[in-house]
Image (cartoon, helix red, strand yellow):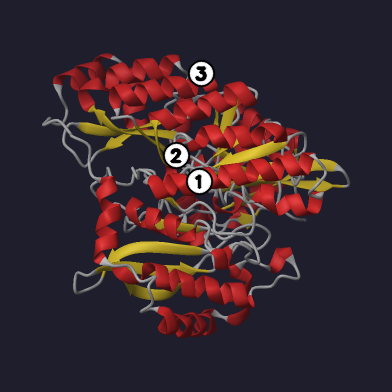
Amino acid sequence: MYQYDEYDQQILNERVAQFKQQTERYFAGEIAEDEFLPLRLQNGIYVQRYAPMLRVAIPYGTLNSKQLRALAKVARDYDKGYGHFSTRQNIQFNWPELKDCPQILAELAEVQMHAVQTSGNCIRNTTTDEYAGVIAEELVDPRPYCEIIRQWSTFHPEFAFLPRKFKIAVNAVEGSDRAATFVHDIGVHIIRNEAGELGYRILIGGGLGRTPILGEVIRDFLPEQDLLTYLEAAIRVYNQFGRRDNKYKARIKILTKALGIERMKELVEAEWDRIKDSATRLTQVELDRVKQHFIDPEYAALENNPAELVNAKAENPAFARWLERNVREHKQAGYAVVTLTLKQKGTAPGDVTDAQMDAVADLSDQFSFGDLRSTHQQNLVLPNVEQRQLFTLWQQAKALGLATPSLGLLTDMICCPGGDFCALANAKSIPVAEDLQVRFDDIDFQYDIGEIDLNISGCMNACGHHHIGNIGILGVDKKGEEFYQVSLGGNSGGRGAASIGKILGPSFSRAQVPDVIAKVLQLYVEKRIDGESFLESYKRIGHDTFKETVYGKAD
């Protein structure tokens, strides 16, 4: 992973010292509340329903064991003993005191972590595939390109106060999209053209929230060295023409929709023609400098399917099931990629305790070169595990409650913190997730119905990405009461084409939600064709049939 040099560390230390002074002045009454607001936002601090929330950046989901231990210490010393991993691969602390935040940031800076630009109207944390660098099917490792974007966008003076927040995601696997690039302000697909040259397909104008829109291709092929100049051109156009009078219409998706993709392309290309040969254009020297931070660890010369693995799998059905769901093939013979699921029953999806974080850091050192990943699905990944050690790892992860064999299944759901914490939420999300975990706890049933993305958001801001869940649940307010709207047919692009879900009909009370989901699943089980996924069945059977099953036929 990328290691800070003396300049990186100096910049971060200076930001920490600056914010410490700003916070002291705020408490002394020298800075007004409205003046302090943008300052704390640019340092990752929101004021939530009951307490401040600190969002710590995990750039493109990559961190090491030392950093995870530092996060565990924050949870233990300054919070209530846990953290929450979000869909942007970051971690959030829901209970720190504002006066402690400068000290928390100082401690995180010691392990090259920060909360810069994790909130506010700026370029946020760039995300990518959690399996980056360790799977054979990717074209190249996308993390160096994410790091290049991170260095360019952090503290970019021109983009510190954009019309609204701006999110970029990068993908390097053709035919799969675990980074959900189609619902980002800009999506970057690393590709090769017909001549074999490396470059990018650029998407623009995607996003969720009140107006969910899939991004459109604005450039079919962009040469490798032109990444930053093109991004700069696109964001300059947005910064100039994006609306600032209405925050609900301020995202680039609204601008792109209003202008049309062809006019948007004209504006971006014109700006790019003006700046594409500027000093921002990448050089091969700079590309090579960043890429050398992402070289492979010293893998041992091993064979696939060692005797230790084959025997343990044959003797232990529970281990075999975990292998099937939570372990995937590695590019290096004799190794595997392991996902530790943060979705055990009775725990909010994405939550992990300080003790579990410390233990996972130990597992990472013992089994995975100290390397870790956080995921869009709110899980953790050990990316470099020897196959012969998988059974031992499984035993230890199981004892920690982190080996639920449910990756990609119904209870591996995405869930935002919702009304339990967020001041913007219309309804609680976590209790709905808990109800569904209890109702569909039968792992055999989950295996029978197969892979399903179920996503829950507590409001239209869509932090739980309900729009792109195969089954999406949205909390809504009806005269002060919490109700839930269900949508079907969404897809992030991880398995097939990206799509926005369609609302099933009128909303339901919380008590009704498990029964509604049960009816949807029962129809799928009854009508599916062998080998057909839920999404495929939904498209074939049709939305109206699902609606009739849930609500009954109209008179």
Looking at the image, is mark 3 or mark 1 earlier in the sequence?
1
Q: Mark number for residue 12? A: 1
Q: Residue drawn 41% across and 84% down?
A: 273
Q: Mark number for residue 112? A: 2
Side of 232 relative to 424 (left or right)? left
The N terminus, quarter of image: top left
Q: Amino acid at mark 1?
A: Leu
Q: Amino acid at mark 3?
A: Ala
Q: Residue drawn 35% across and 15% down?
A: 395
Q: Position of residue 41 (x, y in %)?
A: 66, 49
Q: Position of residue 373 (x, y in %)?
A: 40, 38
Q: Mark number for residue 355? A: 3
Of badges 3 and 1, the one in the foreground is 1
Looking at the image, is mark 2 or mark 3 earlier in the sequence?
2
Q: Single out the residue that lies furthest toward the right.
A: 479
How many residues crowd around disc 3 within 10 Å: few (fewer than 14), some, or many (20 or more)? some
How far is mark 2 from mark 1, CA to CA?
A: 8 Å
| For the residues bearing labels 2 and 1, Cβ distance under 8 angstroms | yes
Q: Secondary structure at mark 3?
A: helix
**Residue 280 image-quadrant placement:** bottom left
Side of 543 relative to 294 (left or right)? right
How many residues crowd around disc 1 within 10 Å: few (fewer than 14), some, or many (20 or more)? many
Q: Secondary structure at mark 1?
A: helix
Residue 85 appears anywhere in the view: yes
Q: Mark number for residue 113? A: none
The C terminus, quarter of image: bottom right
Residue 349 appears anywhere in the view: no
